[in-house]
Amino acid sequence: MKSDVIEVHDRSADIYDDMSILVENHGHEVLFGLAFEHLSTGDSVLDIGIGTGLSSYLFHKAGLKVYGVDGSETMLDICRKKEFAVELKLCDLTAERWPYEDGKFENVIACGIFHFFEKLDLFLKETNRVLKKDGTFSFTVMVSEDDISYYTDTGSGLSIYYHSDFQINELLNKYGFSMLKHINFFIYKAPDKKEKLMFKGHLAKKV
């Protein structure tokens, strides 16, 4: 049985890239910019929740080998047609163990997915496992300007979760990461550009 999150992403797959342009979603560029100085041609990057591939295409352009995992087969089909990923796998992102061996990747990214999950422990635990020592982990979270923890999106009906700096720092420390840098950025909630959402891009290193 598909989760509500996967069903919403299945329905939006065909318009995802175009919608990202309309709402000025530059999260993928933010993560690439944060990680760039640590990247090396020929290294690998695992894109957690790769979707249509928007978030890792720049890493491919920089000469990295892109691996992707996602829960939406519809999203993966679109990404597959772009023909830049080395390997794409359909996987429940909340599974206890992702389908990769320990220490496989030099880099892991997660762009625009963590706000769909209240608890991020599994993501941090598994990212630590599949990363090489000193590997980078770049990711985005939504940040509340009103100190609330979540809201229900009226369009999709999904719960959208905020993650504070305190929560993120606790998780990074718990699962063996050190924070390198972070930056705030905004995305419009809809193409009418009447309301902005604040995100934060983080870059951490496995220690």
Image (cartoon, helix red, strand yellow):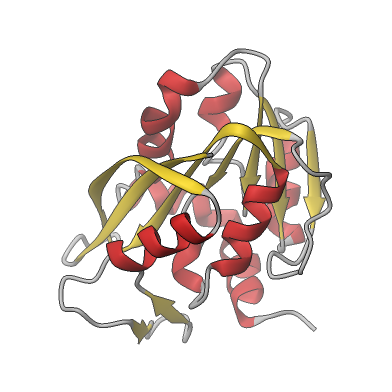
Q: Position of residue 136 (x, y in %)?
A: 52, 35
Total labels drawn: 0
Apparent side of residue 79 relative to residue 190 in the rendered image (left or right):
right
Is there any visible trace of residue 189 in the rendered image?
no
Apparent side of residue 72 relative to residue 139 in the rendered image (left or right):
right
Q: Position of residue 67 (x, y in %)?
A: 72, 37
Picture layout, residue 142 above or below residue 202: below
Apparent side of residue 43 relative to residue 90 in the rendered image (left or right):
left
Relative to the observer, which residue lies in front, 160 or 108? Answer: 108
Q: Position of residue 27 (x, y in %)?
A: 38, 45
Picture layout, residue 204 above or below residue 140: above
Is there any visible trace of residue 183 in the rendered image?
yes
Image point (41%, 53%), residue name: 140
The quarter of the picture where the N terminus appears is: bottom right
Picture layout, residue 204 above or below residue 164: above
Q: Position of residue 107 (x, y in %)?
A: 59, 34
Image point (47%, 86%), residue name: 157
Relative to the observer, which residue lies in front, 140 or 157? Answer: 140
Query: Could you say which quadrant of the image residue 96 lies in?
Result: bottom right
Image point (76%, 69%), residue name: 95
Image point (40%, 64%), residue name: 170
